Every structure is written in structure tokens, then in C-alpha cells.
Amino acid sequence: MPSQPVYKRVLLKLSGEMLAGDKDFGLEPSVLGRLAEELIEVRALGVQMGLVIGGGNIWRGLAGSEKGMERAHADYMGMLATVINSLALQDALERRGCYTRVMSALRIEQVCEPYIRRRAVAHLEKGRVVIFAAGTGNPYFSTDSAAALRAAEIGADVILKATKVDGVYDKDPKKHADAVRFDTIDPFEALRKGLKVADATAIALAMENKTRMIVFDLNVPGNIRRVVLGEPVGTLVTNN
């Protein structure tokens, strides 16, 4: 089995729902603890770690707008939810001795740093885990798009999209027993088939910057480490 990472700098994208565990809402401390320990293990391999976390365990802007709330207002609320999640993971990491920085696209200097690209890269080079909060800082953009944007800005080798399934399938594996998982898929093909890899803006941005994406199951302990070591985990989304 490989013992050296194949990626030097990665951008890990987590949905907020992943932090809720088996609950429908909120934060599950045991999930935060396990995730923190896995991130520390990967960092010990010499991998530079950036993260983008969604806020769906607290608030989803799109859901709010569908219920009549003004879309931009609802999206800003969602950005604040990502800050809460980012601070929670920072706490879990730092209680385990891992230096971490939360950098927000919205200015909230009392609790986290403003996002500045050069400063973010400097933190990564010093071995700190950097959590990018508040999405892109703009309404109408998802945290998938934020992940693709930050990955391009920091020069990440790959986007690791952590999900609750073990890759990209031709149809929903929870509903169809004959669903087929792709080992590799071209992003154009994923878009054409309407596969739920990421939103179209995120995929287009990743394609334009030739950033690879790996979709994998975070619920399997040790999978982050396996992915960065180059083991065949999940689905590789690439056109290069």
C-alpha cells in the first residue's frame, strides 16, 4: 500500500449535513472529533489542508427562498451558518493541538480572519489547517462553487468532495439496486447526464482551472487518508 501522499495541497469540501451525524439538525460532537482526528492524521503526512464547509445542518438559503424569503437575504443567513460550522471544527482541531485558521468571505474580525488569498497560502505553507467560511461571500453561489473557487485560488491539486455515498453513480443507488458507480467520469459527461457531482458553476470552474475532483464516502473511517495516498477510493472527476 502507498505510504506517501500523491497530493501536496488539497481542498476538502464537506456538506453541513455531514456534521449533524444521524440527526437532522445541529452539530454532533463525536462526528467533529472523528473528522478532526482524520484531518490531523492527513496533515501529519505533510499534506496542506484547506476546507470548505456547507451550512445545511443549520440553514439552507435556497430552502428559505423557496418558502418566500428574499433569496439574497436567505443566502447570507446560510453563509453565517457556515461560519458556525467552521468555528466548531476549528475548536475540535485546536483542542487536539492542531493549529487552525478560519478565514471568512464576510468580515467578522471578532471571531475569524477575513479571507485574503496570500495570507491563506502562507497559513497552508506553515502547516495550519485553513477553513474557508461564508462561501464566496456572495448570494446565489453554493459552497460547492466556493470550494472550486478557493481550490483554484490556493492552487490545490485536487478537490475532495466528501459525501455519504462512495462515488458518482449513473442513478441514485439508494433507489436503484442496479446503479453503476463510475471509477472516473468526465465533468462534461456528468453535466450532460445530470449527475449530482456538484452544481454546474462549480464543475465549470473546476474544469476551467483543470482542478481534479474526487467524490468519496466520508462515513468510512480513514477514507481521507486513503484518497490523499492515491488509493482507488470514490470517483475521479476529470477531463485531463
Image (cartoon, helix red, strand yellow):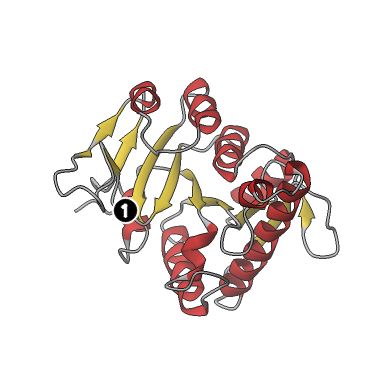
Choose between 183 and 56: the one closer to the eye.
56
152 to 94, vertically: above or below = above
Q: Residue at x 73, y 50 (%)?
A: 74
202 to 114, vertically: above or below = above
Percent position of residue 97, x then y: 57, 74
In the picture, the quarter occupied by the C terminus is top left
Residue 203 placement, left or right of 166? right
Percent position of residue 100, x then y: 63, 63
66 to 185, vertically: above or below = below
Q: Residues within 10 Å of mark 1 (few under 14, many from 20)?
A: some
Q: Residue at x 33, y 27 (%)?
A: 193
Choose between 227 and 46: the one closer to the eye.
227
145 to 206, vertically: above or below = below
Residue beneath disc 1: 165
Judge whether residue 204 can be spotted in this image: yes
Q: Residue at x 36, y 57 (%)?
A: 164
Judge whether residue 240 can be spotted in this image: no
Number of numbered discs overlaid on the protein picture: 1
Percent position of residue 104, x then y: 74, 51
Residue 160 placement, left or right of 185? right
Q: Could you tell me the amino acid type at mark 1?
A: Val
The secondary element bearing badge 1 is classed as: loop
Q: Residue at x 78, y 55 (%)?
A: 113
Residue 8 placement, left or right of 229? right
Choose between 156 and 161: the one closer to the eye.
161
